[in-house]
Image: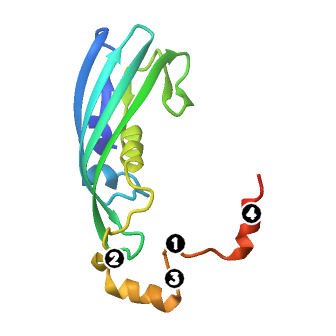
Amino acid sequence: MATLSPYKIPFLGLSVGFHTYEFELDDSFFAAYEFSEITHADIQIDLELEKQSTMMVLKFELGGVVETECARCGDPLEIEIEHSDRLVVKFGDTTGTSDDDILEISTSEHLLDLSQYLYEYAHLALPSRSVHEDEEDCNPDALDLLDDLGVDDDPDEPLDPRWDALKDLK
């Protein structure tokens, strides 16, 4: 995918030490992924790459504004995000992940593709439930439909007592 090529770092000729990179994620980046929750984006990424003899340590700082759907009404919702993450890249015989934040890359590789990691980090920055802060900002037609269907998202309302038996299981 040509839209993802700016997120590949040629690391083979890098000297040992610290290197910095800046990336921007916009609408075209997230359009390359079929199931992205982010519809519009303006995200800036600062990357500090420390190359060592047997590995690289990457530190990401993400910040910006994204648009996603409100989980309550389905209308567009603009959210400010910030996220920090770290990735360790070890040089080995094969390419693959051994852990969530450790990537093993073959010594024959010369490019480090960060696009999937940037996609995941941007989604990790989203709140667990994206809704308008003020319910009055939600689509009134969707709220009326939820009321008609008897859907209530009040977390303080007591749960069905049949679920209480599950709390005792450990």
Residue 59, x across and y down, in percent: 34, 28
Residue 11 in view: no
Could you say whether the residue bearing mark 4 is in a helix, strand or loop?
helix
Above or below — where is 156 with respect to 12? below
Q: How many numbered marks does the figure carry?
A: 4
Question: Which amino acid type is marked by label 1?
Answer: Asp
Left or right of 158, for residue 52: left
Label whose residue precedes the other's in the sequence (4 or 3): 3
Question: Which amino acid type is marked by label 2?
Answer: Glu
| Observer-nearest of 115 and 135 | 135
Give the labeled residue for mark 3: 151
Residue 34, x across and y down, in percent: 42, 57
**Nearer the observer, disc 4 or disc 3?**
4
Left or right of 61, for residue 169: right
Residue drawn at x 34%, y 57% is: 38
Label whose residue precedes the other's in the sequence (2 or 1): 2
Quarter of the figure that contains the N terminus = top left
**Nearer the observer, disc 1 or disc 3?**
1
How much space separates mark 4 and mark 2, taking CA atoms?
32 Å
**Quarter holding residue 132:** bottom left
Give the labeled residue for mark 4: 166
Residue drawn at x 23%, y 37% is: 23
Q: Residues within 10 Å of mark 3 (few under 14, many from 20)?
A: few
- What is the number of the mark on residue 156? 1
Could you say whether the residue bearing mark 3 is in a helix, strand or loop?
loop
Residue 132 in view: yes
**Quarter holding residue 68:** bottom left
